[in-house]
Image (cartoon, helix red, strand yellow):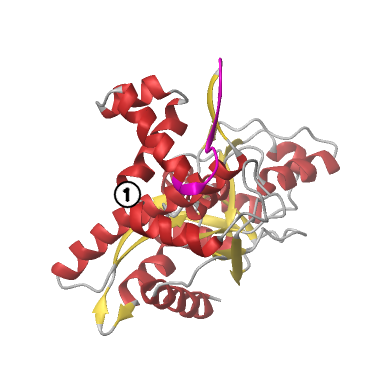
């Protein structure tokens, strides 16, 4: 039980009535500002109000909740255990208010709703774009904002309601607290290179120590793909290559490889096939003994998904079923 709340004295119905009658969105914004700045003085300056007014409002809020929301010390203000719970909900409610405005804008322009979707690198663009184009709610299209980043960057934004859904690689290293995930499909790694280099390498057994001397263009370090590639080289007695460039942009990787007869990369099979079509690269025929982490759809475990989220999720499932 959080400090300041006694189980015998806590009346959930009374607290709920009190909050419903008195809590306002500006209160939530105020709490978030105090957390961000760690000081009533700095938060008051940022919000252009007096510190006494902010102090009084915080006291009023803590009275509503029946316990302190922040600990005060010479180092500043830090949320109490109860404060952390309240702030997490406040962040989500403020984000949801912003999403409501986007939904209103979408409806007024003749669409059904607006979604904020997080996408990690190396998700096939044709499947994602087809799902965006196919998703309908009551016969009307959805509008979308697509946010790119790693799973570790995007999942916290899903938890705090910045994002509605995330499409990314599932991994045991991820923090899945308060989240659900559904496997959409599994990816295999593929080697890609300039067409001339790929044709030359395809005529021989791959010599990994020699391959280490090529110009490798790789994704972000400390990822599963990089770890497996390093283990492959080490298993043949060769040091893993130092990449000439690191990028999570499939387009950039394709362009760099197409422009160089000494460049090589490893990407998911469906991304390799896209690069063959649009960038003039070729796939080197080689089968790896390992698979990449599966691509999954991440959603929040708490609350009920909106109809727009469910429709887009179904469009994604259909797209990936066709792709595989």
Q: Quadrant of the C terminus?
A: bottom right
Question: Eyeballing the image, is 261 above or below 177?
Answer: above
**What residue is shown with label 1?**
25
Looking at this view, is 1 or 191 the one in front? Answer: 1
Q: Residue at 48% x, 52% y: name it.
A: 89
- Residue 167 pos. (x, y %): 50, 61
Q: Tell me the crowding category of disc 1: few under 14, some 14 to 19, or many 20 or more residues within 10 angstroms, Cα based.
A: few
- Residue 127 pos. (x, y %): 43, 69
Question: Eyeballing the image, is 279 above or below 226?
Answer: below
Question: Would residue 7 appear left or right of 125 to someone viewing this image?
Answer: right
Q: Residue at 60% x, 33% y: name it.
A: 243
Question: Would residue 213 appear left or right of 205 to someone viewing this image?
Answer: left
Question: Would residue 305 appear left or right of 171 to someone viewing this image?
Answer: left
Looking at this view, is 175 or 293 the one in front? Answer: 175
Write the start and end of the magenta stretch as one range. 64-74
Of helix, strand and loop, which one carries label 1? helix
């Amino acid at each position: 039980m959080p400090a300041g709340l006694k189980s015998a004295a806590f009346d959930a119905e009374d607290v709920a009535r009190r909050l419903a009658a008195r809590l306002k969105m500006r209160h939530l914004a105020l709490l978030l500002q105090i957390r961000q700045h760690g000081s009533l003085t700095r938060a008051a300056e940022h919000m252009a109000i007096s510190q006494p007014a902010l102090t009084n409002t915080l006291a009023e809020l803590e009275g509503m909740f029946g316990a302190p929301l922040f600990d005060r010390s010479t180092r500043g203000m830090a949320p109490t255990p109860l404060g952390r719970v309240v702030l997490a909900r406040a962040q989500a409610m403020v984000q949801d208010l912003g999403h409501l405005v986007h939904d209103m804008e979408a409806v007024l322009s003749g669409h059904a709703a607006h979604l904020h979707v997080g996408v990690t690198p190396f998700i096939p663009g044709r499947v994602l774009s087809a799902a965006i184009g196919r998703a309908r709610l009551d016969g009307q299209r959805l509008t979308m904002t697509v946010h790119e980043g790693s799973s570790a960057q995007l999942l916290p934004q899903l938890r705090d309601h910045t994002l509605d859904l995330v499409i990314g690689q599932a991994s045991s290293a991820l923090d899945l607290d308060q989240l659900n995930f559904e496997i959409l499909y599994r990816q295999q790694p593929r080697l890609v290179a300039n067409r001339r280099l790929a044709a030359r390498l395809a005529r021989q057994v791959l010599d990994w120590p020699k391959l280490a001397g090529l110009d490798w263009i790789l994704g972000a370090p400390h990822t599963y793909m990089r770890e497996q590639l390093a283990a492959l080289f080490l298993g043949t007695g060769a040091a893993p290559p130092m990449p000439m460039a690191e990028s999570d942009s499939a387009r950039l990787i394709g362009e760099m490889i197409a422009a160089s007869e000494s460049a090589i990369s490893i990407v998911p099979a469906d991304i390799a096939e896209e690069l063959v079509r649009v960038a003039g690269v070729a796939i080197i025929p080689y089968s790896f003994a390992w698979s990449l982490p599966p691509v999954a759809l991440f959603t929040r475990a708490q609350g009920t998904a909106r109809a727009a989220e469910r429709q887009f999720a179904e469009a994604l499932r259909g797209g990936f079923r066709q792709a595989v």
